[in-house]
Amino acid sequence: IDYTGTDPSSPCNKCLSPNETPCVCTINFTLEQSFEGNVFMYYGLSNFYQNHRRYVKSRDDSQLNGDPSALLNPSKECEPYRRNEDKPIAPCGAIANSMFNDTLELFLVGNESDPTPIILKKKGIAWWTDKNVKFRNPPGGDIPLEERFKGTTKPVNWVKPVYMLDSDQDNNGFINEDFIVWMRTAALPTFRKLYRLIERTNDLHPTLPAGRYYLNITYNYPVHSFDGRKRMILSTISWMGGKNPFLGIAYIAIGSISFLLGVVLLVINHKYRNSSNTADITI
Amino acid sequence: MEQEPAAAEEPGSPEARRRRRRRREGRTRTVRSNLLPPPGAEDPGTSVAKGARRRCAGTQHLADNRLKTTKYTLLSFLPKNLFEQFHRLANVYFVFIALLNFVPAVNAFQPGLALAPVLFILAVTAFKDLWEDYSRHRSDHEINHLGCLVFSREEKQYVHRHWKEVRVGDFVRLRCNEIIPADILLLSSSDPDGLCHIETANLDGETNLKRRQVVRGFSELVSEFNPLTFTSVIECEKPNNDLTRFRGCIVHDSGKKAGLYKENLLLRGCTVRNTEAVVGIVIYAGHETKALLNNSGPRYKRSQLERQMNCDVLWCVLLLVCMSLFSAVGHGLWVQRYQEKKSLFDVPESDGTSLSPVTAAVYSFLTMIIVLQVLIPISLYVSIEIVKVCQVHFINQDIELYDEETDSQLQCRALNITEDLGQIQYIFSDKTGTLTENKMVFRRCTVSGVEYSHDANARRLARYQEADSEEEEVVPRGGSLPQRGSSGSHQSVRIVHRSQSTRSHRRTGSRAEAKLASMLSKHTAFSSPMEKDITPDPKLLEKVSECGRCLAFARHQEHPLAHLSPELSDIFDFFIALTICNTVVVTSPDQPRQKQVRVRFELKSPVKTIEDFLRRFTPSRLTSSCSSIGSVAATKPAHKAGSSFLSTLPNDSALLGLEERLGPPAPALASNGYSSGARGWAAQCAAAREPQPEPEPEPHSEPQPQPGPEGELRYEAESPDEAALVYAARAYNCKLVDRLHDQVSVELPHLGRLTFELLHTLGFDSIRKRMSVVIRHPLTDEINVYTKGADSVVMDLLLPCSADDARGRHQKKIRSKTQNYLNLYAVEGLRTLCIAKRVLSKEEYACWLQSHLEAESALDNREELLFQSALRLETNLHLLGATGIEDRLQDGVPETIAKLRQAGLQIWVLTGDKQETAINIAYACKLLDHNEEVITLNAESQEVCAALLDQCLHYVQSRSPHSAPEKTAGSLSVGFSPVYPPSTVTTAGPSLSLVIDGRSLAYALEKNLEDKFLFLAKQCRSVLCCRSTPLQKSMVVKLVRSKLKAMTLAIGDGANDVSMIQVADVGVGISGQEGMQAVMASDFAVPRFRYLERLLIVHGHWCYSRLANMVLYFFYKNTMFVGLLFWFQFYCGFSASAMIDQWYLIFFNLLFSSLPQLVTGVLDKDVPADVLLTKPQLYTSGQNREEYRPRTFWLNMADAAFQSLVCFFIPYLAYYDSDTDVFTWGTPITAIALFTFLLHLGIETKTWTWLNWTACGFSILLFFTVALIYNASCATCYPPSNPYWTMQTLMGDPVFYLTCLIAPVAALLPRLFCKALQGSLFPTQLQLARQLAKRSPEKLSAPKGTFAQGHVPGEPRTEPSEQRSLRASGSFSQDCGSQASWHAQQPACSPEASGEPSVVDMGMPLREDALLEGLSGQTPGASSPGQVVLEGCPRYSRRKPTSTSRAAPLSSIFSLPSFSSLSWISSLSLVSGLGSVLQFSRSGLQMDKRDGEFLASRPQPDQDLRGLSGQTTDCF
């Protein structure tokens, strides 16, 4: 679901103007089929070059791993998002600086008046290794995160510092999963990133029954300036991962091409078998 | 010369000690004894000279004898080696790229990492250099520490020193069989005549002994040479590399000067033979010795393929720049577009300002160059070097190129032009020694106008030729023996011996034993039994013995020769000339290289009085000496005189009488005859004379194994002609028994031993084309000149005979007759030599002698003076006769030439021989055919030549007008139809041949005619250039090479071919009879001409196709890989970002994908050797550069682009709009690329061995292992990719596997299809041959023959498992099952394995095994296990059809009765169909295709099977 709001009729169109902050808009949609099993909620960005060379470089893995020295003295790669007002930025770099900060809320309109909020799970969306190995908060045991991040400042574009990303201590600071997901730079300019999980609560009910829903968006992330697009995607996952019809199509296409070629070769072989035999004899 | 300073440097007082003195002035070097005191120190008069000398000594060093061939020292290694490596442009390029990476604004990788591959390559090369240098150092060390005896001043005797301590001016004493440590001037020899024999095999490969002479003036010193008394100064040339020239002079105390020649010089590396001890002074040492100056390293030639490759590398660079430019522009635009919009992902500069688009574009350009550097394959050069080294190794190891006879094999001397062997278009061949054996056999002769045809000899030779294997019966030669027996009654004893000896030869006459014999007697050059064993012509033999009888009777009279009729005297002279006029050295095999008869004469120098001579050789002395033979304790003077006529006729009977009387020692004496008697006798003399007894030959009491009384004298000659003539003379009982530098002993039938005083020898040279000896005839005391030379030269030098008197007329008649016979000989292909004689009066001789001596002692232009002096002597000759010597064709020459012809090679023969001889040889070796038209060009002048050429051209054009325009295009490949070799395109009727002689060739090679000549020559099937000089040979080669742009190969064996060999693209030397010069100059050395066939047709073809394919593959691989990156730029704003992790990017080429292609490059054999040999036409693919042309290159590049597109966009689409990150997405792409490369290689590989499998498996394994380890190693390292746990995550993702399967298949589909289509519609010769090779073993009932030819390296390993499959039918299915699983274990790299669950289809190479795969391909998807097993088995058994028991699996399948399902039947019929019908491969291929499709569309298996069985019945 595209909620960028370029279309004037879109409810989010109003948020395009920079002066309206914070801007909340609501988008209605209907699910024709119910979603069985776990549902993954993605946000998708288009025309966003997360794979730009200098963008990709602009991070400091040691800092993200909680190395205290790197925390206060980030790598040069982070320039120009390395220091702000003589304080080191944590997390430094352009990637962190441009973190996606829209907030999405999903509501099921069960009956007209009483929409049910869908429980969106924040944890479990990042790779386990990322969360537990690659990304670590600065050491410090029981000391509150704020203390641990002392001496650093927030990235320029951020509203809150890194230690206030979430109230949950296990999902705060560098190990905030939204942050981790964002830091995994996308391969292509059109990408999606996992935003939330909608877990199946019991076996009898579908996770997301068919029906009308609405999406509440706190619109912060400006993509319009560079012709970017924002989307929200709901998807279940099969054994193959996300739903992508391409592979199936590719297999069928290539299979049939091979078949065609096989037939062609068969015909050709029948026709030319004799001539090739004679050619054999002449050499 | 510099007499002035030399005189000034006379020694002062002897007590002062100096190590050595040196001085060099202008072009000369002065050497004096190290033992001498410093000159001038006490000499007040030479202070100026001293100063000058000191200055010279300070600035110039004479090299000491330390050998140092190493390039580097420990310190200088690194800079020097790096410097040398940076001569290669590619290295500079890569270092530049790596350094570019250090610039922060543009760097793409971690700087250190980017340096890694360059450093790796440099390190590998450096290590290789270091190793080579170290082994050189070791061998140097070994040589430097060889010991020799050097005279030490302190101890006043010879002491042991290492070679490296020998210095210029030292006195060195060498004993027999020692190797000479430096260039030494021979000052003293234990040989009484001041001679020393050396073997120069180390220098030029000639095994015959060369004679060296003590410096004149020192040979008089009978007592042992004392170095302390040596005060002379030697002036000689500066060190140079001319082995055949040395000149200088020695200045004695008295101011006398004596010339020094090369006869006085012992060269480093030679071996002293036949001489107990020699002493000499070192003149040149160490690196200044001629041997080392001659020793230049291996030549560097750049092969054609490499040139083309370099050109393509440049294209790649261009492509790289284009790509970079493109993306730079793109990036500039992108930056412009997004910058003002303040997009979130735009990273400004560190100071906050954003980059201007232009700057960004420039940065992007540089970064792109770094990122895309992979396009220029960094490992290409290293890989090619490795492949070439391996190829050279294989060629060297090829057992088929091993020559038993000479115990030699092919050597590759040039390492980097192996692939040129596969592209040769023109072969330029020498004739003598190349096409022919260069083993001369005396065939015919004519003496004074009478021809002696030697029919028996001819018959015998014919027998040699035909009877190669069959055991030859000992033919007692009944025809000739009685005749000889009757020829002289006194000879009967000897004739019995002779026939024994000849019989022993005959016994060894069978070919195999001849080989053995020649191997046993490797020391002796030119002494195969065939040459030695000559059956005399009975007529001539009779005349010879008659002549001998006459002479024996007439001996005591005043003018013995006058009693002979002119004819007989001519015959006598003829044989004397044959025997004497040469430089043959006589040795005896039982005492190798030990001079047997050491009878010393008081004949000192050539300059003597006639009276003295007469006095010494009066008949009375002769008879008295005869009586003294039996007495052991003869006095020395008696020896001196008597031994010369030791073996006169009465002597024979005396010996026989002695033999009867003496008892025990008698048999030895008898069997050895007088030579052994003389030997023992001489030994005692020697013992008495010399302080140290020479090694005694053998005790007399031992029975002699030798069959003949001759004691098997061996003749070692510098040229095989000489040996042949001497052996021929021996057959006429005119034996050369001894040869010293001033005398020659000849044994004659009735006269016994005659000793000729050898006054002069004017050696053979190629300008005069003759050699002469001046002797004093012992019977007549006349001074005779015997000249032997090429007929054209000698005939012109004959005494002009007046037609008036009868004698003159007779002479004229003889001459014309001889000329006729000469022509006849030439027509028969014999080498002709004329023998002539001149009688000099004493006055004439004295006059000539004076001028000759002057010439000899002259230092400047001595050669010229000597030449003129020789000219003066060799005039007014009296023709004696002529000889015809046959030079037999080598084994297999006609066949080889025919094969090479078929292979589309043009063969030109460039020979120095006569036109007739050359033409005959050409006919004999099928170079010319009798139904061909032969155009002969013999022009006397430029104009005539031009006219003739025009005429011929007109003629040729009128014959084939249609082909003329095509031919003018200059390239032979134009208008070439693949079935016929190019030379036969024009000729529907008889083909043309061109014969041109040397003079016309000289005209034709003029600037204005060379085009016409070439044009004409191109029309001809073969070209024969006769009488051509070495220079002309090289000019012809150069002409063809430059004008026709053709690849040329020159093959030759002698020094006269060296220039030609060096000019040609590929020079091949034959390590044959004429020394090693040709081999030294060559790139390849073969033992025989016939090995050229295998070398070119098999190895050349292989090397070319391997290397061409490998280079193409390299380009493909890199382009494809870079393509992936390039496509990505479209999706990352052209920011030069790479989705592939930098580690993979950098090491992909180097580690992951390099091994399989190396293995393929080394081992791939597109067509088996036997097929290549039977179908030489296949060679034309190399000539036309079919495998590697610009067109194929660009097709290849296009394919690479396509494949990269597929390999990029399949993952792109698969991961489009997903949550993968850059490097998680890049890793599958890398994997896909790897799989695609391997599969592509699989398509290109024609022979699969276990090594290929291993290499592929290893590559994949390595990639995954490295990826896993790398991704697990560090959580925070390797920015920016930080691929922690990426691979591990991917391994759990099915999409990864699915894309990895589909993408390579899709990428390779077009290529495969095109290949298959082209293979069935327009198969190339090679493909047909490959197919043929596959089916031929099946057609053969006895596959053993082909099995031997295979030599597939992997065969031994796979065989056992195959044998396993051929067991009894009970365990058969299980075995097959295990084999099927074995297949399944192979990496899944066949394209049809795309998601195919059936195990059988995995792991088979596609194209060449297509017909095998047809079998497996027809079991789709889920079939019964039994069927799988069945399918696996026949395929497997068919895959190695060359195995010995190949038929077994088929029959065992048939014998399996139990199963009766439909699938069984169909597959059985299929198997049988394959067993008998062979065209199935095509259908097999598309079955395979179809199969690939089944997995997607899942059709009914039954249907397919039905279709298949229907098809099989079609096949039946």
Image (cartoon, rainbow, N blue to C red):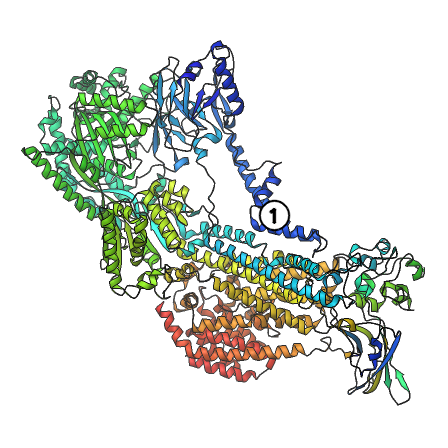
Image quarter (top left, top right, bottom left or bottom right) of the N terminus of chain B = top left
Percent across and percent down for residue B964 are 31, 63
Q: Residue at horizontal 37%, vertical 12%?
A: B254
Label 1 packing within 10 angstroms: few (<14), some (14-19), many (20+): some
x and y percentages locating residue B564 in the rendered image: 10, 29
For the question of whether residue B1372 can be seen, the reply is: no
Q: Secondary structure at mark 1?
A: helix
Question: In the figure, B50 relative to B1123: above or below?
Answer: above
From the viewer's perspective, is residue B566 above or below residue B88?
above
Q: How many marks?
A: 1
B819 and B303: which is toward the camera: B303
Quarter holding the C terminus of chain B is bottom left
B1191, A259: nearer the viewer: B1191
- Pointer 1: what residue? B122
Q: Is B1245 rendered above or below residue B164?
A: below
Outermost residue, bottom side: A112
Question: Percent x, y for residue B459?
Answer: 20, 48
* Residue at 19% across, 27% down: B784
Query: What is the chain identity of the residue bearing mark 1?
Result: B
* Amino acid on which the number 1 mark rests in the picture: Leu
- Decide: is B269 above or below A55: above
Residue B41 visible: yes
Q: Is residue B160 left or right of residue A118?
A: left
- Location of residue B1073 in the rendering, given as x and y in whole percent from the top left corner: 34, 41
Of residues B369 and B1052, the one drawn nearer to the viewer in this rendering: B369
Locate residue B592 relative to residue B787 in the image: left or right. Answer: right
Dividing the picture into quadrants, the one containing residue A46 is bottom right
